[in-house]
Image (tube, grey):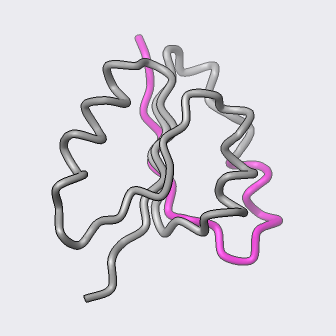
Amino acid sequence: MRKIRVLIANRPRLMRELVVATISDQPDIEIVGVLEDQASILGMVEQSFPAVLIIALDRTEDRPTYAHAAGSLSAPPHTYLGGGA
C-alpha cells in the first residue's frame, strides 16, 4: 500500500501535537516532517515531496507566503490552511 506523505507545519504547539496524534497511527499516512518555523516550509516541501501540507498558525494574517511560492514547484502538495483567532 502506498502511503500518503504529509508535512505538518503548525505554529501553535498544541495544534501541532494534536494533528500528529490524530493522524500518526493511520496505516496509510506517513508524516514526513513536523515544523514550527514557517520559514522552513518551502525548503522542507522541496526536500520531502509531501502529497499534503497542513498549516495552522497563531493568527490568520501570519499565514506563510508559501502559497505564492508553491507555483514554482513541479508538484506542489495539497495545502490545508488553518489558523488563529
Horizontal relation, residue 33 to residue 37: left or right: left
Q: Where is residue 25 in the image (x, y as percent from the top left)?
A: 16, 55
Taking the spot 54% from the left edge, 21% from the top edge, the residue there is: 60
Residue range (magenta): 67-85
Q: Position of residue 57 (x, y in %)?
A: 51, 24
Q: Position of residue 30 (x, y in %)?
A: 35, 64
Which quarter of the figure is the N terminus placed in?
Answer: bottom left
Q: Position of residue 80 (x, y in %)?
A: 45, 48
Does the magenta-highlighted stretch encompass residue 36? Answer: no
Name the foreground residue: 41 vs 58: 41
Does 27 sit above or below residue 66? below
Name the foreground residue: 53 vs 43: 43
Horizontal relation, residue 18 to residue 67: left or right: left
**Outermost residue, top side:** 85
Taking the spot 50% from the left edge, 63% from the top edge, the residue there is: 78
Horizontal relation, residue 55 to residue 72: left or right: left
Taking the spot 73% from the left edge, 58% from the top edge, the residue there is: 70
Which quarter of the figure is the C terminus placed in?
Answer: top left
Taking the spot 48% from the left edge, 41% from the top edge, the residue there is: 34
Name the foreground residue: 41 vs 83: 41
Does the magenta-highlighted stretch encompass residue 72? Answer: yes
Does 53 sit above or below residue 1? above
